[in-house]
């Protein structure tokens, strides 16, 4: 019998922590933002073309609240037509009856949903070396929001949606002195590592910094070469302050957030786990373990979702390296499985995803 | 020995419901908005002068998150210098370790805190007969926000801050066919009932409606002669849908919100209680019982706070009818008492309020 959850790193602690969450009530928080870095051609597949990347995060969270997007027709797809992982997240939250909250870290297009405003603004292209205008303010406001959530949930699942986010993750990690070259993930089957490294290095150059220069000042690193999602997620984790368990729901972008906290206030990660998808932990074009191993060393777990049997091309493409992760898909699936104490399986999630996929694509 | 909580209406059900909440974990949600109705001279004391009423709601919620206001120096006071009831709320939430969330129903000045945006805009003067532009959208968005909260809290406490809100409550109640003349509360010792009725009736006239015309269409009543807080609170209550207990934390403004739900979807009030202050239930210039008795008939409970022994003029003035209620002060106090299972008393709350008052006034 297939395991529902894969323990991919720091397994012993991962098993213990995840075991303690069974039957508990999670709250899912999705942090959305944009960075103009996503508009550099060839970098992101989160949107049919670079200009549409502004619509991807709001459309993603609309999918979580409604059974459809409101800010545009259809659902976000890659240039190849592969649907957003928000489809997985929405299905998992629905099956698991998990409440969702949205944090606007800095969007250009606002979602037609309730969202928590934290004073953020869209991130600029990191090649300018001036990536995020008001990091400190975003961190302060998400910090106090995180405190409120820490008092009201058994545990939190924090997801993200920001096109171009793996490139800003790379730049941030380099500024922090983490050997991340060739190790961040991608929403495309062929990971454009060379381009990502070029963009990240141009960002560091423009900011006048070198590899590792900002290890002791992660806030500055986000300001110069990061993105608003990183600021909001970091503030949120600081606000939770290690008081309740935390699933950082994402791939290498969440490894970058964990790195920020590791260098800023590591005790806030004591109850944190990275929860992602099988497509991330089995990805040969990226290496999340190596990123975490150099920094926070927190457990990595993954939902054992498998779309290889799907008759839908848009889903089976996930097995070939399209999309892989995003919108907290893996963490939401893990949370649904845990909340139901095994009542919800990956098989059931896959069925729900197929049903929702068919409905959404019919519109 | 003094009772901590006063049971003022529908006492038997009130005692039963409040008893069931002992030891449970509440979440406090403060809905803030503005209406230009507050700028009609002589109507509201929530702000030192009419133009300052735009700053009162954001300053109030800044007090809940920080130990001071950020959007202006000092704290909101009445023209006589009596401090905002947010001082009571902040003290109760702090003592009770109760998490707070802010909903922006429609503000002109934004708070420097995290807040949930629901697409609201400031309300216009109700004498125009076009009070709130997008009631339906606000209700829809707060409804889905309410659903998320209903899945994540044991029970909810919903407070409000909107200067001029008792006049819009009066107009709304009249449109709904509730005999509310001379019955809504005031933030001033002498309740300007004649002026309030004139303003409300001019609103109904401009909208082309008469007493009771909109009993079957409360959404329309808010649109024509209500305020954005009413829309947001109503949507929120609809979203919670009676699934968890609800303290409607306020005076006659919350009676108006309850009336909306009563005529719209009464089953959503099955677990609802109005939780307010002693200054409201003992007020001779208003009559909250009469309002509830004509509509929802839900229990009214009140925190038995008493500032008569205070050496601070700003606090003892509450005993003479200044302020009375607002920012969910009474409900927050009730929730703190209940959460602590009696560990927190009104006496302790009064002490905490005195300490915080001294600190805030020193700035």
Image: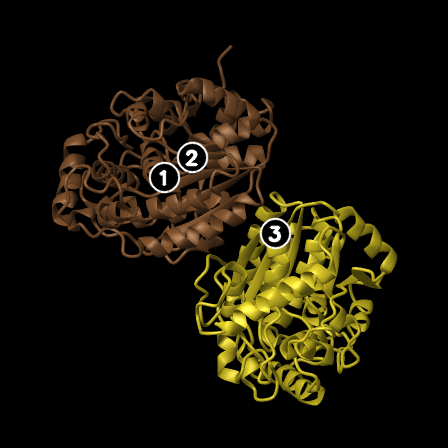
Chain colours: A yellow, B brown
Q: Mark 1 packing: few (<14 Cα in 10 Å), some, or many (20+)? A: many
The residue closer to the viewer here, B181 or B354, is B181
Q: Secondary structure at mark 3?
A: loop
**Residue beneath the point at 32% across and 38% down:** B263
Q: Which residue is mark 2?
A: B269
**Residue beneath the point at 80% across and 49% down:** A19
Q: Which residue is mark 1?
A: B261
Please check whether the numbered discs 2 and 3 fall on a single chain. Answer: no
The residue closer to the viewer here, B84 or B99, is B99
Question: How far across and how far down the image is residue B18, in percent?
Answer: 51, 25
Q: Which residue is mark 3?
A: A98
**Residue beneath the point at 78% across and 62% down:** A301
The correct choice, above or below, for B15 with respect to B161 in the image is above
Question: How far across and how far down the image is residue B278, in percent?
Answer: 39, 22
**Circle 3/circle 1 CB separation < 8 Å:** no
Question: How far across and how far down the image is residue B340, in percent?
Answer: 60, 27
Q: Is residue B176 left or right of residue A84?
A: left
The correct choice, above or below, for B248 with respect to A107 in the image is above
Q: Secondary structure at mark 1?
A: helix
* Residue farthest along the front direction in this orientation: A311
């Amino acid at each position: 019998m297939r395991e529902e959850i894969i323990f991919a790193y720091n397994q012993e602690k991962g098993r213990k922590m995840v075991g303690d969450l069974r039957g508990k009530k999670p709250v899912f928080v999705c942090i959305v933002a944009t960075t103009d870095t996503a508009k550099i051609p060839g970098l992101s597949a989160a949107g049919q073309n670079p200009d549409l990347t502004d619509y991807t995060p709001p459309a993603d969270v609309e999918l979580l609240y409604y059974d459809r997007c409101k800010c545009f027709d259809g659902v976000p797809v890659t240039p190849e037509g592969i649907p957003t992982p928000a489809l997985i997240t929405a299905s998992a939250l629905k099956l698991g009856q998990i409440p969702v909250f949205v944090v606007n870290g800095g969007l250009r297009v606002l979602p037609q949903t309730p969202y928590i405003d934290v004073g953020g603004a869209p991130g600029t292209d990191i090649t300018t070396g001036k990536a995020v205008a008001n990091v400190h303010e975003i961190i302060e406001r998400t910090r106090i929001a995180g405190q409120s959530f820490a008092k009201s949930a058994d545990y939190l699942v924090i997801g993200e949606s920001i096109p171009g986010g793996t490139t800003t993750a790379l730049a941030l990690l380099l500024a922090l002195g983490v050997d991340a070259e060739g190790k961040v993930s991608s929403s495309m089957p062929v990971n454009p590592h060379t381009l990502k490294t070029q963009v990240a290095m141009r960002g560091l150059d423009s900011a006048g910094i070198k590899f590792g220069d900002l290890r002791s000042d992660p806030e500055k690193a986000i300001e110069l070469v990061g993105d608003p999602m990183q600021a909001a997620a970091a503030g949120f984790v600081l606000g939770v302050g290690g008081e309740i368990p935390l699933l950082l729901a994402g791939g290498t972008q969440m490894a970058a957030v964990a790195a920020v906290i590791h260098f800023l206030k590591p005790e806030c990660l004591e109850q944190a786990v990275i929860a992602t998808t099988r497509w991330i932990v089995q990805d040969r074009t990226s290496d999340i373990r190596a990123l975490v191993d150099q920094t926070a060393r927190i457990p990595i777990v993954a939902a054992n979702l498998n779309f290889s049997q799907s008759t839908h091309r848009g889903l089976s493409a996930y097995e070939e390296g399209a999309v892989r992760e995003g919108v907290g898909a893996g963490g939401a699936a893990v949370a649904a499985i845990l909340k139901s104490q095994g009542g919800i399986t990956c098989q059931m999630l896959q069925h729900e995803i197929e049903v929702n996929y068919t409905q959404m694509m019919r519109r």
